[in-house]
Image (cartoon, rainbow, N blue to C red):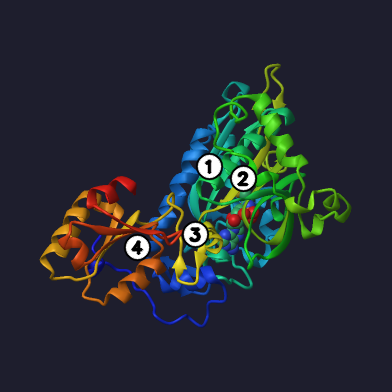
Amino acid sequence: MRLSRSFIPTLKETPAEAQIASHRLMLRAGLVRQTSAGIYAWLPLGFRVLKNIERIVREEQDACGAQELLMPTIQPAELWRESGRYEDYGDEMLRITDRHERDMLYGPTNEEMITALFRQSVQSYREMPQILYHIQWKFRDEVRPRFGVMRGREFLMKDAYSFDMDYAGAVVSYRKMMLAYMRTFQRLGLKAIPMVAESGPIGGDLSHEFIILAPTGESQVYYDAAFEEIDYLSRGAGGFSHDSADDLHRFFQLMTTNYAATDDKHDPVAWQKVAPERRREGRGIEVGHIFYFGTKYSRPMNCTVAAPDGSKVHPEMGSYGIGVSRLVGAVIEASHDEAGIIWPDSVAPFKAAILNLRRGDVACDAMCEALYAKLGASALYDDREERAGAKFADADLMGHPWQIIVGPRGAAAGKVELKRRATGERGDATPEEALARI
Ligand code: 5CA
C-alpha cells in the first residue's frame, strides 16, 4: 500500500482518554477509533492485525481437530430461558425486542446456541466426540469499559465447545484445547501462562485462565519461569501431539505441576519452594479462558446422545474462549517502546515499510518503486512529501518489523539501509540483500 493513498490517520498528540500504552498507541498509529463507549471501528492498519491474529487462532483450532462454523450475534431469549441463564446474566446482557415483541439478545457467549444446534443433529455415540468453534463478535454491557479494546463492550472472541460421551473424553478435549492455546500464544510472540481459575458465570468445576505479564494487567500473578522454556510448537522428541493420549497427559502434567497462580489462589509457602531466579511475578492480562462444565447445559436443555447400549447420555461439555480483539492490545502491551509499537513478525500489518527519503529524486524513486513492485501487499511504501524525520517517526510508531530506508546518497551507490525495528540494528545492503533478509 502507498502511504500517500492510505487511510491511516496517525495522531501527533497523545489522546487524553487513553490511560495505557496499547490504547494510546492504537489511537496514535491509526489502528482503531471509538464510535461509542467500549465500541470500536477497526481501521485498515488495525484490521490487518486483527485478521492476522484471527488466522493464527484459526489454524491452531483446525490443527487440533476443531471445526469452524458461524453462529449469529443475535440470539432468541428462549434458549437462555432453557438453561436458566436469561435472568442470571443480569445487566451485562444487551436485551433487544423485535417488531413482534419477541425477546432477543446480542450474544455475550454461545453455550446455549451450540447446545441447541448439537441437540438437533447429533443422535449417536458414533458421531462423537465433536469440537466446534466460531470467531464472532460478542457484546457485554460492561459497567466500566476501559483500556480501549482490552475491555470493550463489543469484542471479537474465538469460542469453541466440546462434546464428549464421558468425563475421560472431556478431559482429553480440554487438554487438546490447552495445547492448541499454548501453540497459538507462542506463535503470537506471547508468553501466556495457564492458571487455575474460578469459572464465574460460565459455570463448571475445572477452569484455566491464560495470562500474560504486562504492567497494566488487572490482577497480580506469580509463575515459574519453566513455562517460558517449553517449545510448545516442537513436533520432534519432547514435543506434544494432539493425537497422543500420552503426550497430552505429559503436557497437562507440565502445565499443572509448575507453579502458576493468580492473587486469589496464591500460596506463599509453595512459592518459596520455587528457586528465586525462576520466580516471575507482576500484573497479568487474561487473553484466554477455558472451562469444563460437564452436563451444566446439556441436562437442562435436554440434549442427549445414544450410547452403545442404547441408553441416553447427556454429553459432557467444555467451552474455550480467546479474546481475539483483546489480543491486539495485549500484543502491544507486551511489545512496544517509547517510539511506538514493535510488531512480532507473525501479526505485523506489513512486513516492511519502504521509506523514500527524497521523493522526486530519480534514483530514490526508481529504487523504491522496484522494491515495492517486489514486495507488493506485504509492504507499506512511504511515498509522502514529508521530512525524513516524520517518516522515521511514523514507521517506528506503526511498528513494522523491517524498514527499508532509501536516501539519495545510498540510492546513487545502489544501496539501501535496512533497519530491524525490534533491535534498532541498521546496516547497508543492496536492494536484493534487503529483500532476501526480510
Ligand atoms: N464462553 C466462555 C468461553 S468460550 C467465555 O465466554 N469465556 S470468557 O468470558 O472468559 O471470555 C473469553 C475471553 O474473551 C477472555 O479470556 C478475554 O480474553 C475475552 N474477553 C472477555 N470479555 C472481554 C471484553 N469485555 N473485552 C475484550 N475481550 C474480552
Q: What residue sits right under mark 3 in the picture?
A: 328
What residue do we see at 51% from left, 49% from top?
A: 188
- Mark 2 or 4: the one toward you: 4
Q: Earlier in the sequence, mark 3 or mark 1?
A: 1
The quarter of the picture where the N terminus appears is bottom left
User: Is residue 103 visible from the viewing direction of this image?
Assistant: no
Q: Position of residue 253 (x, y in %)?
A: 74, 35
The CB of the residue at mark 2 lies under 8 Å from ligand 1: yes
Q: Secondary structure at mark 2?
A: strand
Spatial CA distance of label 2 from label 4 is 29 Å
Q: Position of residue 277 (x, y in %)?
A: 74, 52
Spatial CA distance of label 4 from label 1 is 26 Å
User: Is residue 221 visible from the viewing direction of this image?
Assistant: yes
Instruction: Look at the numbered discs 2 and 1 and tell me whether their residues touch, using CB distance below 8 Å.
Output: yes
Q: What residue sits right under mark 1 in the picture?
A: 133
Comparing 413 with 6, the one in front is 413
Q: Position of residue 104 (x, y in %)?
A: 54, 59
Instruction: Look at the numbered discs 4 and 3 and tell me whether their residues touch, using CB distance below 8 Å.
Output: no
Q: What residue sits right under mark 2 in the picture?
A: 320
- Mark 3 or 2: the one toward you: 3
Q: Earlier in the sequence, mark 4 or mark 1?
A: 4
Q: Position of residue 208 (x, y in %)?
A: 70, 47
Comparing 175 with 351, the one in front is 351
Q: Earlier in the sequence, mark 2 or mark 1?
A: 1
Q: Earlier in the sequence, mark 4 or mark 3?
A: 4
Spatial CA distance of label 4 from label 3 is 14 Å
What residue do we see at 42% from left, 56% from top?
A: 49
In this picture, is 291 found above or below 397? above
- Ligand 1 quarter of the rendering: bottom right
Numbered badge on residue 44 = 4
